[in-house]
Image (cartoon, rainbow, N blue to C red):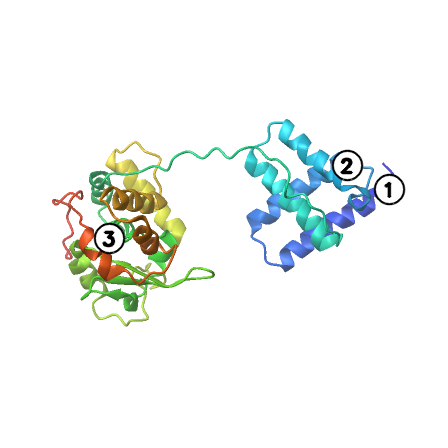
Amino acid sequence: MKPGILSKLDNIYKDVERILHSTHYSPHTIRAYLGQLKAFLETVSPKLPSELSVKEIKTYIAYLNKSGRSRSTVDQAVNALNFLYTEVIHRSVLIRDINRPAIRKAPPVILSGNEISRIASATRDMKHKLMILLTYTAGLRTSEVVNLLVGDLNLENLTINVRGTGKRRNRKTILAEILRSPIQFLIESRKPSCYVFTGSEGNPLTTRAVTKFFKAALVASGINKKATPRTLRHSFTAHLLESGADLKIAQKLLGHTRSDITSYYGGLWNLTDLNPEIELDSNN
């Protein structure tokens, strides 16, 4: 390949990398896009991307499809090329409408109430135990649990105000009666602006830390399921619908639509499937 072509391809690669960093894409996305771009440039050379027709670009994507690449890999390639042509070459190419491999989604893992009790009981750390149970009984995302403030809890009315971020709206969900006393003990004397669950220096725990202690508790419980903290939210949803709750109510509790339905829904939810022997002694 001519040195001039190599230089131009290298400049394109560096331009994409620079713009990705300047627009604050995540490190994971940057690595994925650059990897896809490198493969693309090597395949189409000695032509430059600006010299390719839309048909040639689509032929490259079709090649990825035929080579047995996963849907996520092909999606990454499409997104990376769209970024290249839109942000660097400044040319609109319609490549999002191409056929891609079907998405094969495995059904989510669901834990029973008894299994969740076993996982929570498997950890001796009271804070970790409460986080597991609260995530399940309120249908929270892990990020919502770690960012929960004392002022978000209404122990009298047994409700939780979940603060929305980005496109997510604020919503209310339920606080289980079984958790009222231990949580009250945990947050006693704290200001409303303080985090409910904190690390050793008073900072909120990370979602990675939650995943780590949940995995340890899962292993210790002896439950042989590929569960994660997100499984608790899936299980909340499944049990909610199994109990006969309306789908729209479930969506509101989960933050998919308007959230002002706690009082309507409160009477439908119970924790009878949780092990009544689970230790929630606030002195633990």
Residue type at mark 2?
Val
Q: Secondary structure at mark 1?
A: helix
- Give the Cα separation between the discs numbered 1 and 3: 62 Å
Mark with earlier residue (1, 3) = 1
User: For mark 1, does the 10 Å Cα neighbourhood hold few (<14), some (14 to 19), or many (20 or more) residues?
Assistant: few
**Residue 265 in the image, given as x and y percentages of width and height:** 23, 56
Per the image, the residue denoted by label 3 is: 130
Depth check, front residue: 90 or 225: 90
Q: Residue furthest top?
A: 67
SS for tag 2? helix
Q: Is residue 120 left or right of residue 248?
A: left
Q: Earlier in the sequence, mark 1 or mark 2?
A: 1
- Judged from this view, the residue extending furthest toward the left is 277
Residue 173 or 257: which is nearer the viewer?
257
Circle 1 residue:
3
Which residue is pictured at 26% across the width and 37% down the height? Answer: 220
Quadrant occupied by the N terminus: top right
Which label belongs to residue 44?
A: 2
Looking at the image, tell me whether mark 2 or mark 3 is earlier in sequence order: 2
> How far from the left and from the top, in percent, is residue 43?
74, 34
